Image (tube, helix red, strand yellow):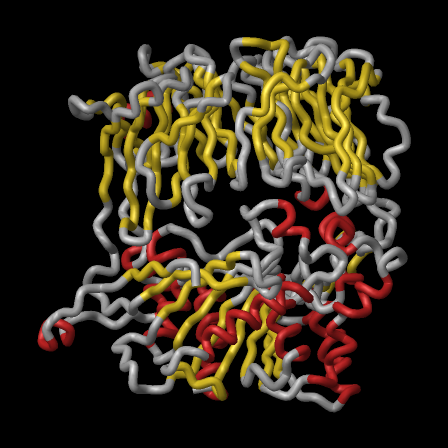
Amino acid sequence: MKRLFILAFMALPIIAMAQKKQFTLDDLIPGGTTYYRTSYPQTKYLDWCVNTCIELGVDDCKDVRPSGSTVIITLDKVNTILQLQGRKKIQHLLNASFPSKDLPVMLINSGLQYTLINLDQNAIVWAADLPSEAANIDLHPISLSMAFTGDHNLYVRRADGKIKRITKDGSADIVYGESVHRNEFGIEKGTFWNPQGTLLAFYRMDQNMVSKYPQVNITPYDASQVYAAKDSASIDSRCATLEPDAYPMAGEASHQVSVGVYNTSTGETIYLETGDPTDRYFTNISWSPDGSLIYLIEVNRDQTHGTLDEYSATTGKKLRTILTEHNDKYFEPMHPIQFLPWDPTKFVYQTRKDGYNHIYVHSIKDGKLVKQLTKGEYEVIDLIGFNPRTKQVIYSSNEADPLQCNIYKVDMKGRRTLMGNSTGWHHAKLSADGEHFIDNYSSPIIPRHIDIVDVNDDEVFNVLSASDPWAAFDVPQIKVGSIKAADGVTDLYYRLILPTGFDPNKKYPAITYVYGGPHAHNVDATFHWGARGWDIWMAQRGYVMFCIDNRGSEHRGLDFEQATFRNLGVEEMKDQLQGIEYLKTLPYVDASRLGVHGWSFGGFMTTSLMTTYPDVFKVGVAGGPVIDWKFYEVMYGERYMDTPQTNPEGYRNTSLLNKAGNLKGRLMVIYGGNDPTCVPQHTLSFIRACIDAGTYPDLFTYPGDGHNMSGTDRVHLHHTITRYFDDHLK
C-alpha cells in the first residue's frame, strides 16, 4: 500500500458521545428538508465588479477589502431605482452579477426582466424584457445585444430594444442556438458572440435523420382539471402522449451540425463553408480578438482526428487549417483556443497529446508551437484566466497531489508557482485585471475556506472560514489510501468509511459505491474526502462503505483513461475486484455480506459486477444503468467503444443482456421513467432478458423523472436504496 490518510474524529468521553446527534436522511441528501441547514457549509457569494470583490447578500451588496467591508448598494435602493422606471421589485441581491470588465455596473435578472444599473450613478443605464418563451439567453456585456431562443428558433435583441428573428424553420428536428453533439466535447451552449458583440456565431442542428426514442408523458393533463370536470368530454386529453427524443444510438445516423454567423449591423446571416456536415463534429468555437475570424475544432466521426480551422466571419469561407491532432484510440478536444491578452499573435491550446492535459502556446500565423507551458504526469484541470501585466496564465491542476486541485500561475518561460493554500480542492475566480482571485476551497478537515489571493505576492486575505456543519453529529471515521490496480503497477485511490460506533471485533456488511467511468471521480481531498451523504447515512446504519476510482476515471492521464477502450467495464471491474480483495483482508468485514451500488455508468458497473462475478456480491442496486452500449448515444458510445459494426466483439462481451442468466444475488434496478440519457430501453431490455433466462431482479421506476432524481424524489430514492440493503444484506 502506497499511503494511508485517516480522517479521525477525536474520541470523546462516553457521556459526551451520548450527546452527539444522529443524522436523518433529510439531513444528508440534497432535496431533504434539513439538508441546507445541516450539511451545506456556510458560504459567501462573491463576485468581481471590475477589480473590486463584491459580496452578494439578501439585503445588500458590499465591497470586500482587508480594511473592512462597505455597503455599495442596498436591496431597498435597487427596488427604488427599479420602481421609478416601472420595473418589478426583486426579493434579494444574490443573483446580481457584474458583466463588464471595465464599468461598475450591476446586472439584475428577475425572470425575463434584465436591468443594468450603474453603481456610481445609481441609475438604470439599460433594460430589457424578453418574451415568455425566451431560453438560452446570451447577453454581450459591451454591445448589450442579447441572443435567445424560442421554439427552437434564434432571436437577437439589440441594445436599442429591437428584436430580430434570425431563423424561421426551427422545430424539434431543426434546432438553432442550442447546445449540440449531446453536450460532448465540452459544449455547453449554442451561441457565441465575437468580442465586440457585433457578430453572433450559432449552431444549427438538423435531427431529421436521427432515430426518435419514444418517450411517453403519462401526465399530459392538469390533474385538478380532470377531477373537477363533470364529464369526460370537457377534458382535452387524459391519455398518455408520445413525446419522442431525437436519440442517435451508437452506429446509427447522427445529427448534422452547421455554424451560422449573424451580423447585427446588416441583419444578414451567412453559414461557414464547412462542407457536408455528415459524420463530423464541430466543437470549441472561438473568435479572433478583432472579431473577424472564427476558429473551431472539427472532429471526425471516429473521433481519432481533429483539425483547428480558421474561417472568415463575413464570407464563411475556410481560410486554413492551423493545427491537426490524431490519436489511434480517440481524440477529445474539450477547450476552445484562447488568445493571449498581451499578444494577439499567439493563442493557448489545451491538449493531452503528451498523455496529460497541458497548456501550449502556439503562433496564430503558422500554428507552430512557441512553448509548452506545463508538463509532467499531472492534469491541468481548468484554465482560469490571464494576468496581462505579468504575462502569466492562471490555471488549476493536480500537480501537488492526484487527489487535490490547486491554483497555479505560469509565465511564458514555463516557470510555474503554486498559489494560495497548498492542500484541498480549490475553485478560483479571477479579477478583471488578473491581479487577484477568489479562492474557494475545502479540504478533508476544512468544510469551506474563502480567501482573496494576490497573484503577484501570494498575499492572502481570508473572507470566510466556515464552521463544521456536522460538529454536533456522530460522524464516522473516514480513511483514504491506495492499492495497486489489476495491472499490478497503477495506483488506485480508495475511501473507506467505518460504521458509526465502530467495534473492531465485530463483523460488518460492506457496500462498494461505484461510478468508474470517464469524466468523473469519487475520491478527492474535499471535505470528508468527498464522502457522499448516503455513505455517511449507511455507515450510521452499521455498514462499511467503500469506494475506489478505477482505471478509466478522470484526472489521471490518457493511458489511465484509455485502458478501457473498446471494452467498457472489463478493466474497470478488474480494478473494483482489487478493491474487494482489499476489503476481504480487513478483519471486521464480513465477506459473505458484500453489496454494490452505483448510478448511470455506476449502474452499468453494478449490474456488470453482479452478473460477471455472481458469487462475490450478495446484493446490488443499479440506478439508471447502461445495459448494452449499442443502445447508448453516438458521441460518447463511439468514442470509448467504436461502433457496433467495427467492434462487434467488444459490444457483445460488454452487453449485460448476455449475462442476465448469471444473476444469483438480489439486484434491484431503478430508473427514471423518462430518462433521456440512459433511455428506459436499457433497463426494460435487461428485465426481459432476466425473465427469459429465469433470473429474478427487482425493479423500481420513478415515473416522469429523467436520468437523476431531484427534490423530494431524491430523498425517496435513497430511502428506497437503503431499504433494499437493509432487507437483503444487513
Closer-to-camera residue (78/357): 357
Q: Is 231 placed above or below 152 here?
A: below
Residue 149: x %, y % from top left: 66, 33
Kindly indicate the quadrant of the structure image that contains residue 105: top left
Closer-to-camera residue (140/409): 409
Q: Is 696 placed above or below 456 here?
A: below
Q: Is 440 placed above or below 562 here?
A: above
Closer-to-camera residue (42/85): 42
Kindly indicate the quadrant of the structure image that contains residue 297: top right
In the current view of this chain or complex, which residue is farthest to the bottom? 694
Closer-to-camera residue (10/670): 10
Name the side, left or right, on which 683 lies relative to 40. Answer: right
Residue 234: x %, y % from top left: 68, 64
Residue 316 shows up from this direction: no
Residue 78 shows up from this direction: yes
Q: Is 542 placed above or below 512 here?
A: below
Name the side, left or right, on which 218 lies relative to 327. Answer: left
* Number of disc labels: 0
Quadrant housing the N terminus: bottom left
Kindly indicate the quadrant of the structure image that contains residue 454: top left
Residue 700: x %, y % from top left: 59, 77
Q: Residue at x 73, y 53 (%)?
A: 640
Q: Residue at x 56, y 82 (%)?
A: 617
Residue 354: x %, y % from top left: 64, 36
Quadrant housing the C terminus: bottom left
